[in-house]
Image (tube, helix red, strand yellow):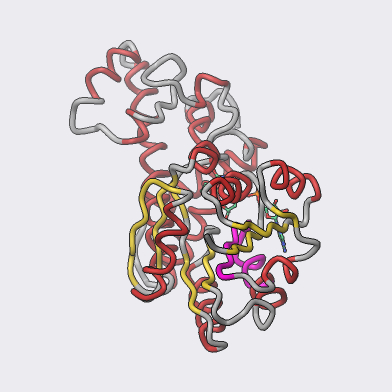
Amino acid sequence: MARIAFIGLGNMGGGMAANLAKAGHDVRAFDLSAEALDRAKQAGCLPAASAEEAVAEAEAVVTMLPAGPHVRQVYHDAVAGKAPTSALLLDCSTIDVGSARAVAEGMEQLGYKMVDAPVSGGIAAAAGGTLTFMVGGSAEAFARAEPILQCMGKAVIHAGPSGSGQAAKICNNMLLGASMVATCEAFLLAKKLGLDPQTFFDISSVSSGQSWSMTSYCPLPGVGPETPADRGYQGGFAAGLMLKDLKLAIQAASDANASVPMGAEAMALYQAFANAGHAGLDFSGIIKMLGGEQG
Ligand code: NAD
């Protein structure tokens, strides 16, 4: 079993670090939040006084941080030259492709191997060890990352060279944001046309309009499997995080000169939803705004 440093023990990282400890790894954990660090301790991790202390002598370093600037700062200040160069570096945060490539390039110049390994699946999947990892990096780095990521997920997929994991993640979430908005619109229109929502679900979920947003994450309470809609849109995947991912996708599209009108419209709608004070609600809650209830 390996000595693994884990930095960023928030909603996602807390559960992930706990699963590494449960698998028998020696997890040296650090977070700026004392509460998060305490929870990691309860879950079997060894709390470190600083990120530098956590990475010293590590065989692998896993980071699960909010955004690109945090990742750049942690690798620059606390990992580069502080962790042994033999340590494999795994950044699981969702960040922009440019930052992911720049950090990996900088660390590789110092002799480290690094992968970007963002995840699909929310807080429950992080806690349950059922995340999907999409991994960018060399074949050699991927081969070393795979057994570590398998302790935290149900699927580990090599997406391509450095930055490809982030590219896959933001394209997936752009599709998810647009499909959720479209699913909400379809339910709202169906209702206005006199269709019972359950009847529309029964038809569309086995017809060509079917999507994950409809069958696994239905935005209407009482229809389909239990989802955040049944809990007043609490928990789940926050609209603010969806907005973050859509912004990353639109920025990447602009850099790559790609046309993404549906993604741009989804971003504008989630921006309006967040501006109305609902960034903390689950992203399927946008049905309330689209239905004219708020926002
Ligand atoms: P979070 O805000 O709950 O956790 C981030 C943690 O990082 C916090 O505990 C914070 O204190 C810590 N942190 C920030 N800067 C630090 C530093 N310099 N050193 C040490 N710790 C530091 O966020 P989260 O929901 O766990 O999300 C983490 C990442 O995972 C984000 O990039 C997010 O987009 C992505 N993600 C989240 C979800 C989800 O459902 N929450 C799903 C998929 C991906």
Picture residue at 37% right of the left edge, 52% below the top: 172
Which residue occupies the foreground of this view, 200 or 4? 4
Q: Which residues are magenta?
A: 59-73
- Please, is residue 254 above or below residue 21 in the view? below
Q: Position of residue 230 (x, y in %)?
A: 51, 19
For the point 51% across and 71% down, which residue is it?
100
Residue 122 vs 109, above or below: the answer is: above
Q: Position of residue 275 (x, y in %)?
A: 64, 42
**Residue at far left of view:** 207
Number of numbered discs present?
0
The answer to whether residue 111 is above or below residue 35 is below
For the residue pair 230 and 119, the one nearer the viewer reads as 119
User: Which quadrant is home to the C terminus?
Assistant: top right
Give how far across and how far down residue 232 sits, in percent. Answer: 58, 21
Q: Residue at x 62, y 70 (%)?
A: 58
Taking depth in this image into account, of 231 and 181 the one nearest to the observer is: 231
- The quadrant in which residue 185 appears is top left
Please tell me whether residue 26 is drawn above or below residue 61 in the rendered image. above
Q: Is 53 left or right of 64, judged from the image as shown?
A: right
Is 151 inside the magenta-drawn segment?
no
- Residue 228: where, in percent of width, then height? 51, 26
Horizontal arrangement in the rendering, residue 112 relative to residue 261 (left or right)? right
Residue at left offset 66%, top offset 65%: 70
Q: Nearer the viewer, residue 163 or 152?
A: 152
Left or right relative to 235: residue 141 = left
